[in-house]
Amino acid sequence: MSAEATITRGADALGAAFDFKSLVDKRHDYARAWKAKTGGKVLGWFEPYFPEEIAYAAGMLPVRILARHEVDDISDKWIYSSCYPVRDMVNQLLKGRYDYVDGLVNVEGCQWMYNAFEVMMNNRESLFYHYLFLPDYTNAATSKDVAKNEFAVLADRFKGWTGKSITDADLDAAIEVYNHNRLLLRRINELRRADRPVISGSEMMNLVLADQVMDKAEMNVILEDFIKELGLRKPGPDKIRLMIVGSETWDARLEELVEAQGANVVADELDNGTSYYWNNVLPQEDRLMALALRYLGRPHSALKDNNYRRRPQHIFELAEDFNVDGVLLEKQIYCHSHGSDMYAVWKMLRERYIPYHYFERGSLLPEDETAARLEAFLSMLKPGLNHLAGWHKKFGED
């Protein structure tokens, strides 16, 4: 798939098979082609709390900085003893893999990602940089006003950088595009509730990752065509239904390993999974306040779920709604926020008698070990007979 092909509209951008994985793998080609065609700026972001609508309203292409592992002979010098995905980001950024990026924005959140942001500030002074504060106590009385003011500062800095004022009409258009994008993603995700989904877990994850590196208006056309194709697919086979909970992910390798074991991931609670597109912006006259309420009201990451502990209940509701048989709890090594929050998730799963398996990982999975652990976990599960007709016979039950 050439860079020129990825910037065309509709299903042709991915070919008849809707190969979202290829789009993720060739995201750099796509961004360079977009930049050459439009003359616009490309803005990299780290945290999913970044209000992309403001950058989009300013005529930019917001792209998520994804971790991809390659030989690393750089990061130790700058970011020793951080989590592996962040070190991989630093390695890629300093090696010029993101040479098309004109600026970087980091939102208050993961300390390791902020460290990567600081490394780039010390090494690529020509780029635009902005640190966006978003309250960790998202439900505090003043949080929405703080977030709105921070968004206003961001918009003003974009104006100084690009020379373009962001009008209410610009924000309205961006919000409409992004709301429609989230709606389409939720429509596709809802299909995973079916007893025999027409979309696999790996396909869904690659789709969502592709969505985070592509122009949303173009992606919306592709998603609409993809929904039509999904309506023509036959139901998939009966499989054990799993849910993934934990640290952000950077590829669909875990979902692929699950599928290789004869199971399927039908739900997730990941910052860059369902939480990324869970809720829309509710339009109001004060556009920045509407954006602030949306980002403060999204399903919270482990770091920002620190006063009312709403995350475990959200995970439970997802597990019920998508009728899962078990949960995979995956935590990035050195991820302090998920390490400190995981006890609350364990407690909830034990109290609700939901089987789970916990493991730690880096940006790369130890595939043989992970496959062996998945096989052992799946062999312990007895799928719910109410939604997997015929499984009881396979397990030798009447």
Image (tube, grey):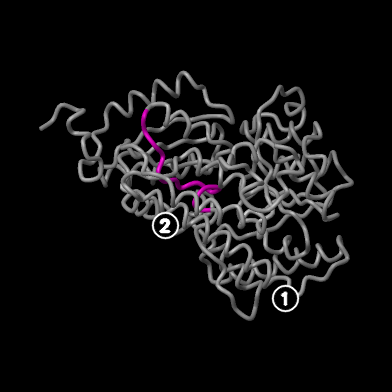
Marks 2 and 1, how far apart in space? 35 Å
Residue 334 occupies quadrant = top right
Residue farthest to the bottom, as pictured:
285
Q: Residues within 10 Å of mark 2 (few under 14, many from 20)?
A: few
Residue 379 occupies quadrant = top left
Q: Answer left or right for 47 relative to 156.
A: left
- Residue tagged 1: 169
- Residue tagged 2: 310
Examine the structure image and report whether residue 111 is included in the region drawn in magenta. no
Q: Position of residue 276 (x, y in %)?
A: 55, 53
Q: What span is colored magenta in the figure?
A: 262-275
Q: Position of residue 322 (x, y in %)?
A: 35, 49
Q: Is residue 353 above or below residue 333?
A: below
Q: Quadrant of the N terminus?
A: top right
Q: What amino acid type is highlighted by mark number 2?
A: Arg
Q: Quadrant of the C terminus?
A: top left
Of mark 2 and mark 1, the one earlier in the sequence is: 1
